[in-house]
Amino acid sequence: MGVEGNKLETGVAHIRPGEGRRSMWVMGERVTCKITSEQTSGAYSLFEIATRPGEGPPPHVQHWEDEYFYVLEGEYEFLDGGRTVRVGVGSLIHVPRGNLHTHKNVGEGPGRMLVSQTPGGAHERYFEELAENPAASFVFKDSFDVETVSAIATRYGIEILSPRSE
């Protein structure tokens, strides 16, 4: 059984720690694509998200996919609809499509999560387009270009409601 890149000849993927298909900065978080929708025949995408303290995306609704968050490190606060819940290592949050949600690292150090969308694909392209668009980036900034981010998000079935208020 040989290995070609990270993919075994049998079709089984092996992604080592610290590796992934692509890493990029998106909305104050380091996003590493671990498994793409191409590798799962569109079933899902899986990302490792590293979040600096105080960071996280604005409140949004995903209309095309369900999303799952598994906390690996740190402490997060999740807005799910009208309620806020604080979670730590080992917590799993499931957000069905159509639900308002966001997250924020409320710990003192970096946080890390595995984040999956089902079906896969749209969110991968959304992250890539945001990462390539300077007007959509707000790493180390207090705000971002709401119109640009909303326009990009709409193309991928995501509705951005407003910037996160601190």
Image (spheres, rainbow, N blue to C red):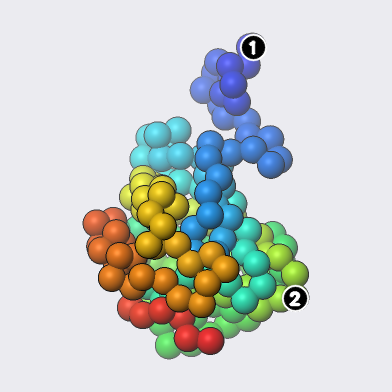
Q: Which of marks 1 and 2 is nearer the N terminus?
A: 1
**Residue most extreme to the right:** 108
Q: What residue type is labelled 2?
A: Glu
**Residue that label 1 marks:** 1
Q: Is there any visible trace of residue 57 in the rendered image?
A: yes
Could you tell me which secondary element the residue under label 1 belongs to?
loop
Q: Position of residue 76 (x, y in %)?
A: 63, 74
Q: Position of residue 35 (x, y in %)?
A: 51, 40
**Residue most extreme to the top:** 1
Q: Which of 143 and 5 is in front in this view?
A: 143
**Residue that label 2 marks:** 108
Q: How crowded is mark 2: few (under 14 residues within 10 Å), some or many (20 or more)?
A: few
Residue drawn 45% across the image and 33% down it: 39
Q: Where is residue 139 in the image (x, y as percent from the top left)?
A: 54, 65
Q: Is residue 81 above or below residue 67?
A: below
The picture quadrant where one finds residue 74 is bottom right
